[in-house]
Image: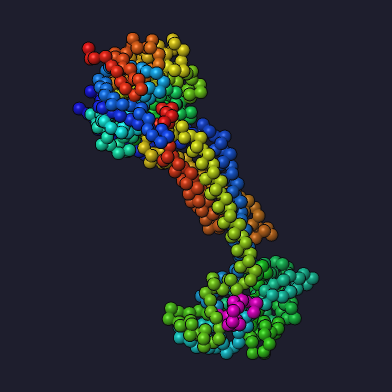
Amino acid sequence: MARCPGPLRPSTLEPMFVAWRDLRFARGRFTLMGTVIVLITLLVGLLSGLTAGLARENISAITGLPADRLAFAAPPSGQSVSFTNSAVTESQWRRWAGRPGVRSAEPLGIRTLNAAAGDRTAAVSAFGTEPAAGIAPGSGKLGPGRVVLSASAAEELGASVGEAVRLGPLEATVAAVAGDASYSHTPVAWTSLDDWQRLGHNGTTPEEQATVIVLRTSGGADLAAGDRAAGTESRTVDEALTAIGSYQAENGSLQLMRGFLFVISALVIGAFFTVWTIQRSGDVAVLKALGASTPYLLRDALGQAVLMLGAGTLLGTGLAVIVGALVSGGDVPFVLEPLTVLGPAAVMIVLGVLGAALSIRRITAVDPLTALGSAR
Amino acid sequence: MSLVLDDVTLTYPDGDGRLTALDSVSLEVPAGRLTAVVGPSGSGKSSLLAVAATLVPPDRGRVVVAGADTGALNPAGKAALRRERIGIVFQQPNLLASLTAVEQLQVMAHLSGAKPKAVRERALTLLDAVGLADLAGRRPHQLSGGQRQRVTLARALMNEPAVLLVDEPTSALDHERGAAIVSLLAALTRDRGTATILVTHDRTHLATADRTVTVHDGRLSQPPPA
């Protein structure tokens, strides 16, 4: 009685019998490739931390605002909104404040200028807001002649609470040091809106009193109608970031570099596994002739790639964390967070596996007949 | 019969035409018997093995392995048949460079979904049967040509095949080692009841076989059954 061949039952205990032994046997080749993965992951990790750090210095004052939208003065036709060119008037934020579904509409003035405390000077961004609006950290301490410095501003100026500082032409006292907001790579000094307006006008008419309107809305607000009525263009906070000119250019360049690194790593890994698969095509032919199924061989080879990628990425990420921890306390703007560390690692693994999978699929084309030394 | 080739014809593309490698070949190989296949180079010996191993489908005719008509099997079914019912010994040892001798056998069980550790004892027993018990931990580059061929033979027997297909196993060996391999093959065939085909150039091995058939220009000539 003939015994029928049974279906393939992959061993769950040791799914990569050959691949694991190949890793040990050809450890020189895999170590070399693993080192490349470690270095690329390290580079991507450091670049990601640096990108996030630079972004934080550029936008943290905006992303930290207690708002869901910002309204800019409507730009001339064909131009985009920008913090530099925007100037809103009291009548505009009054109109926004009276719209249904708008919980609050507060003016916010932004101006970059030189500050001084004693014999130390620094470039800061003055953010002017109504003290009662609750927009600035330590709002209760804001008032005429009283400013709240961010931690970085206080550190750069060497100023502490109760000491005198000068913001452009404004003489003031440090009422508090709170938060660590930063805008366009300069630390933020919070002032009252009245003081901010004394620093100089943004536009040509004395009515212009702030840069943007900080909006807190509920779901029912008709934003388009609000913009038409007030003569503004409102954006979500995330959309408004593109109105910071330096942020768009800087972040775009760094993200482009990061993207290229991801593509390069996928290509390098793909090239390695292409050569490796060609080198072992004789073994693959023998295994096929002995009865190995194509899914078995693909699982074996892909498992090998995932293992190497996982180990290399883990080591590279670990090194990036160590280097990041060493530099993030100093002058280098570096953000060490799960997203900046694990995000690039996950992308590396996914793209690397894709590159390897495209190379490994040539296993399906290996003819087991070649194991017999056949010349057809 | 464990292996039956019934009126098998196999052709290959050859320029604008086709080259006939096997021409209406019929062969029955019973269990426990060693059938030697001889013939000049290019006569169709390796094609005969390739068809019997389900590595290439014939243009015409039937190939039945251990009761299974291979013409009715899809590629996955043929792979499963090779895994579980057919043992192949290649002309070149074709061992996997990263595996030790015992692992070369264990991988056969792994292909079938078994846990390699569970079959280690069986693998060691088979290595002992081919005289390599002491060399189980060596990799192919640490073995001689004859030892590698013995490992291949043990590997082919690992899944208790019904059919054993052996392609010129002594071509890279000296006469003494070649004779030892063929004697071992004959003994294992009878002990384990496999239907064995031995393709060989060396006529000195024919005395060890139970039967000899000759292939010439793709045609088979064989003595009438005794």
Q: Tell whether B155 sits left or right of A327.
A: left
As displayed, is residue A190 above or below residue A307?
below
Quick one: A177 or A36, which is closer to the camera?
Answer: A36
Where, by quadrant of the figure, is residue A208 drawn? bottom right
Residue placed farthest to the right in the image? A119
As displayed, is residue A76 above or below residue A151?
below
Quick one: B226 or A230, which is closer to the camera?
Answer: B226
Residue placed farthest to the front in the image? B16
Residue placed farthest to the left in the image? A1
Q: Is residue A189 visible?
A: yes
Prevalent SS, magenta region: loop
Residue A52 x %, y %? 59, 61
* Residue bounds of the magenta highlight: A71-85
Residue A1 x %, y %? 20, 27
The quarter in which the C terminus of chain A is drawn is top left
As displayed, is residue A208 above or below residue A253?
below
Residue A119 x %, y %? 79, 70
Q: How is the image coloured?
A: rainbow
Residue A73 is a magenta residue: yes
Q: Tell whether B198 sits left or right of A282.
A: left
Number of marks present in the image shown: 0
Name the residue at 34% across, 20% down. Answer: B215
Quick one: A348 or B16, which is closer to the camera?
Answer: B16
As displayed, is residue A133 above or below residue B126?
below
Q: Is residue A288 visible?
A: no
